[in-house]
Image: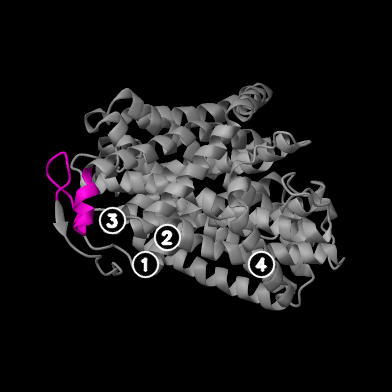
Amino acid sequence: MSESDAGMFDQFFEELDPIVFLFGAGITVGVIAMFFISPTTVENTIATLNEGMLAYLNWALLAIVFLIVVFLLFLIVGPWGKIRFGDDPPEYSFLSFFAMLYSAGFAAGVVFWGPTEALFYYDNPSPLFDVGSQSGAAMSVAVQQTLFHWALPQLAVFTIMGIAIGYFAYNYENVPLRVSSALTPILGKENLDGPAAKTIDILAVFATIGGVATSLGFIGSQFVSGLNFQWGIDLGNTGIILVVTTMTLLFTISMVLGVDKGIRRLSNFNMVLFFILLIATFIVGPTIFLVLLGTQAIGGMITDFISMSLFTGAGTEGGTQWVNDWTVFYWAWALSWSPFAGLFIARISRGRSVREVAFTGIVATSAATIPWFVSLGGTAVWMQHNNIANFSEVMAFEVGAEATGFIMFDAFPIGTVFMLAFMLLVTTFFITSADSSTLAVSMMTTGGKAKPSNINRIFWGVVLGMTAAILMILGGVDALQSAAIITGGPFAFVCFLAMLGLIKHFSANHGRTLLQDETVIIGSSDEPSSISGTAQTSEDDD
């Protein structure tokens, strides 16, 4: 071993937070090992815990996510929005900041489910709406429900964690960039290395690895199943390992290049391809119908937002099960991703105001998400309703959701080009998600170090890839998905406490200064000092 290699390994061990690293890695590897020993036992245990969470905490998840959305909207328009994350100018331009935030959060899921999700609601509408299955009225309700699930609420839980972590990390000395820092007002700055903080960070590691590995499994299955469905190419287990290994290699290369050369540039490419495919689908699809459908669906989402947010299904036949299967599932899934997404948002938000982060997190990203689901989801529903394409096997869960894009684009002129662009977009979006998540886990396991060593990042990248490959081969993706959902329950309360902590802290420390148009900078004492100032101009870090 050369002297430089020895130095790299020394840095790797020196930077570790041993408790978070060992327990976080241990839980993840332990779940994988148990699949080899007794997969049925693990799956049954996870299923039991999952059912318990849905039975007793579904209402809490619905209420907490709704309150977080309301709070973020207040931050956008209220006086607290002027508070800044430190005194430095923004590290990235607004467009790069937006692209990274969007790509790192849930954009791969947006692309993957774009043509599919509205079909499920078209076939099985929410009991909240009195419309018949596969009726004309179900078309707009289906797109409306999709927009509700993928716009403000999911993005809100990422954003609240990002604001809470970033504010305390950049405005106080000795507050690290890690998930537990979001609860600084609750735990106390002196207790951020205590048992409660360590527990939160360990759960965050497990939730991140579990959530992202499951998503890598979905993307891998899209390639394997899609190739088999469309072109009859059956790759088998060898193909699964090849696909996952290739993706792992790609996001590891991007990760080692760093945020600027890797994540930022790939995120910018993602957004360009995203909008090209969006506009092309809108033009080739039923354009006028999509305009009318989108207008009605957006209006319905705004009008019914409160009732959709707090609908538990009580008093309707099958309503509670429907809500648990869809809305509660999505909220819990987003909450399980909130540790890494929030930590990454905090990482790229230095120098920005609370208003900028809140606006980008839920408004700007929704402005990109809504047209995508209207165009692709609306086109798929229109094709099914008018017998132009047949998605009945997808709606009956006889074939996977990955088939929808192939069926839809097959009906387009030059459909193969659309298919290839769609598969490329899902892949590149996932690479940025995996890239940013492994960076976040590296930060979690090094006590909040903003730039962990390459060995640390590569270690977690390999763990992530191995987890996904093993689970795909063992058929355990559903079980780990349920495990990640279970972690969403506790993180619902972490997000809620983070919001309460921000309200308490902002009202106590910034009520008077904000009236004088003052902003926050890093201070040397327990409370941040204030100076008069205005927003810095965003600049790239090239």
User: Residue 294: which numbered mark, if any?
Assistant: 4
In the image, 289 versus 380, the foreground residue is 289
Q: Is residue 306 left or right of residue 282?
A: left
Question: Are the residues at dot 1 and dot 2 in contact (C-beta closer than 8 Å)?
Answer: yes
Q: CA distance from mark 1 to mark 4?
A: 27 Å
Question: Who's the residue at 47% across and 56% down the image?
Answer: 362
Decide: few, some or many residues near mark 1? Use Cα within 10 Å; few <14, some 14-19, many ≥20. Answer: some
Question: Who's the residue at 66% across and 67% down the image?
Answer: 294
- The residue under label 2 is which amino acid type? Thr
| Residue at numbered disc 3 | 350
Work out whether 501 lies above or below 299. Answer: above
Residue 212 visible (yes or no): yes
Q: CA distance from mark 3 to mark 4?
A: 36 Å
Decide: few, some or many residues near mark 2? Use Cα within 10 Å; few <14, some 14-19, many ≥20. Answer: many
In the orientation shown, which residue stands out farthest toward the left?
524
Residue 261 point in image, percent of width and height:
37, 64
| Residue at numbered disc 2 | 360
Q: Earlier in the sequence, mark 3 or mark 2?
A: 3
Q: Earlier in the sequence, mark 1 or mark 2?
A: 1
Residue 176 point in image, percent of width and height:
26, 41
| Residue at numbered disc 1 | 94
Determine if the magenta segment contains residue 519: yes
Decide: few, some or many residues near mark 4? Use Cα within 10 Å; few <14, some 14-19, many ≥20. Answer: many
Residue 285 visible (yes or no): no
Q: Earlier in the sequence, mark 3 or mark 4?
A: 4
- The residue under label 4 is which amino acid type? Gly
Residue bounds of the magenta highlight:
509-529
Q: Nearer the viewer, mark 4 or mark 2?
A: 4
Residue 1 point in image, percent of width and height:
30, 42
Question: Are the residues at dot 4 and dot 2 in contact (C-beta closer than 8 Å)?
Answer: no
